[in-house]
């Protein structure tokens, strides 16, 4: 955890995803999936309050090896590594960075080039 991190709640994940362009969600029996223009970039599991996010293979390996209490290797596919993220181990700004990166890895070039408009939320002590 970074410093004295305040655990991120699921609502923060929804706020971040909701601020990204062209995101569509599909609710399944056990999870909700998130796509940008038809390409998958994330999942949310309400039972465990975890998210699955698309990352580069090197980022997947770095996250899991540096903080195995927060990140788990989910799977690899198409040259990307997916990680399970335990929300309770993150701060909001770190979650935002990971979600935006996952979104960019799936978004078409014209959309990924435009910076997302994410108002940063600050935690009060």
Image: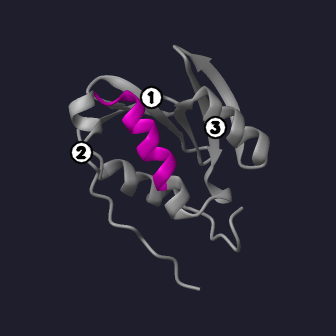
Q: How many circles with numbers are drawn on the protein? A: 3
- Position of 104 relative to 121 (above/below): above
- Main SS, magenta residues: helix
Whether residue 105 is in magenta: the answer is yes
Tell me whether the residue at label 2 lies in contact with that at label 3, contact meaning CB atoms closer than 8 angstroms.
no
Residue 34 occupies quadrant? top left
The foreground one among 11 and 108 is 108
The foreground one among 99 and 104 is 104
Residue 89 occupies quadrant? bottom right
Could you say where residue 12 lies in the image, as x and y percent from the top left?
Answer: 45, 60
- Of the image marks 1 and 3, the number of the one nearer the N terminus: 1
Range covered by the magenta-colored residues: 96-108
Q: Looking at the image, which residue is at 66% across and 28% down?
A: 74
Q: Quadrant of the N terminus?
A: bottom right
Q: Looking at the image, which residue is at 49% across and 29% down?
A: 29
Asked which secondary structure carries label 1, the reply is loop
Asked which secondary structure carries label 2, the reply is loop
According to the picture, the residue beneath numbered tag 3 turns out to be 84
Left or right: where 71 falls relative to 56? right
According to the picture, the residue beneath numbered tag 2 turns out to be 114
Could you say where residue 21 lies in the image, as x and y percent from the top left?
Answer: 24, 43
- Position of 92 relative to 85 (above/below): below
Spatial distance from mark 2 to mark 1, Cα to Cα? 30 Å
Asked which secondary structure carries label 3, the reply is strand
Spatial distance from mark 1 to mark 3, Cα to Cα? 17 Å
Q: Looking at the image, which residue is at 39% across and 37% down?
A: 103
User: Which dot, 2 or 3, sits closer to the camera?
Assistant: 2
- How crowded pointer 1 is (Cα within 10 Å; few <14, some 14-19, many 20+) is rated as few
According to the picture, the residue beneath numbered tag 1 turns out to be 28
């Amino acid at each position: 955890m970074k410093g004295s991190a305040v655990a991120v709640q699921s609502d923060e994940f929804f706020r971040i995803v909701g601020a990204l362009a062209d995101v569509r969600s599909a609710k399944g029996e056990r999870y909700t999936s998130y796509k940008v223009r038809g390409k998958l970039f994330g999942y949310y599991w309400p039972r465990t309050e975890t998210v699955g996010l698309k990352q580069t293979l090197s980022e997947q390996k770095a996250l899991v090896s540096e903080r195995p209490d927060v990140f788990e290797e989910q799977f690899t596919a198409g040259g990307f590594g997916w990680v399970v993220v335990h929300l309770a181990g993150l701060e909001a700004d770190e979650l935002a960075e990971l979600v935006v990166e996952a979104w960019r890895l799936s978004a078409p070039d014209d959309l990924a080039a435009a910076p997302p408009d994410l108002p940063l939320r600050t935690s009060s002590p």
